[in-house]
């Protein structure tokens, strides 16, 4: 059983604010104090990666991977969304259904972890054409209320699953946080500058293993791309 396709995708500037996390933990302690951002911050100017997109493409015209460089092969009409495989996964249940704006939350049945998903356009967020890594940091930065330049040194590159679960082939950027009460969380984001869209997931655990939960999410959920 799968959920119906999500066709309503609003601008990030309108929906990202609902996903803000309180930054009272370890990540916040590393970020210089700054004023609250009223609008998405501009990503820093950087030279696009010299990596070239993969030449190995499947019959549908898409690369077999979706590295940051491969993202430049997408068009402005490419459609990108979460596959949402957790709805049928053992150990998971719906916490908050799709709100119609591209955001919903699933949680583990033991109540220790939640996974909040978002998919949508990145209108209003200044991405960097030809550099999905910096653009993904800009998306992370907007969720956190920080600049991409501030987030970049704290983020690492990871992979989300591509087209089907347990197929980690989509490059993404990730940050971690830990609260004084022991709660841990991670945000994983990928912006697709050529397509003008993005996705992220926030995994939030109290008593659960945030890394193991991310692995479980990746085993069931994938980023589905249609050219």
Image (cartoon, rainbow, N blue to C red):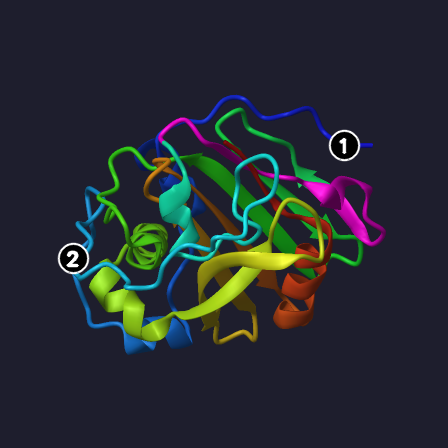
9 sits to left or right of 82: left
Q: Is residue 77 magenta?
A: yes
* SS at circle 2: loop
| Relative height, residue 98 to residue 166 (above, below) | above
Q: Residues within 10 Å of mark 1 (few under 14, many from 20)?
A: few
Q: Which residues are magenta?
A: 76-93
Residue 127 placement (x, y as % from top left)? 25, 46
Which is more toward the observer, 77 or 53?
A: 53
Give the foreground label among 2 and 1: 1
Label 2 neighbour load within 10 Å: few <14, some 14-19, many 20+: few
Helix, strand or loop at label 1? It is loop
The disc at residue 35 is 2
Name the mark on residue 2. Answer: 1
Real-space Cα separation, disc 2 to disc 1, in angstroms: 42 Å
Coordinates of residue 224 in the picture (x, y in percent):
59, 40
**Rendered residue at 16%/58% (across/down):** 44
Res 7 → quadrant: top right
Q: Residue 84 lies in what quarter of the image? A: top right
Residue 132 lies left or right of residue 93; in this view the side is left
Residue 125 is labelled as none
């Amino acid at each position: 059983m799968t959920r119906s396709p999500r066709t309503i995708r609003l601008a990030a500037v309108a929906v990202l604010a609902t996903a803000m996390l309180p930054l009272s933990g370890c990540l916040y302690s590393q970020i210089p104090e700054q004023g609250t951002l009223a609008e998405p911050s501009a990503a820093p100017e950087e030279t696009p990666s010299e990596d070239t997109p993969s030449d190995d493409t499947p019959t549908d015209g898409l690369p077999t991977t979706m590295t940051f460089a491969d993202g430049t092969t997408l068009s402005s009409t490419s459609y990108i969304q979460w596959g949402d495989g957790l709805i049928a996964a053992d150990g998971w249940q719906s916490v908050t259904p799709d709100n119609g704006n591209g955001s919903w939350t699933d949680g583990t049945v033991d109540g220790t972890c939640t996974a909040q998903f978002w998919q949508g356009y990145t209108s209003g967020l200044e991405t960097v054409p030809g550099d999905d890594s910096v653009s993904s940091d800009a998306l992370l930065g907007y969720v956190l209320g920080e600049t991409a330049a501030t987030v970049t040194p704290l983020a690492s590159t990871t992979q989300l699953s591509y087209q089907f679960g347990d197929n980690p082939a989509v490059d993404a950027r990730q940050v971690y946080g830990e609260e004084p009460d022991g709660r841990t969380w991670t945000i994983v984001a990928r912006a697709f500058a050529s397509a003008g869209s993005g996705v992220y997931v926030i995994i939030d655990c109290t008593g659960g293993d945030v890394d193991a939960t991310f692995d479980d999410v990746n085993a069931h959920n994938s980023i589905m791309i249609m050219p």
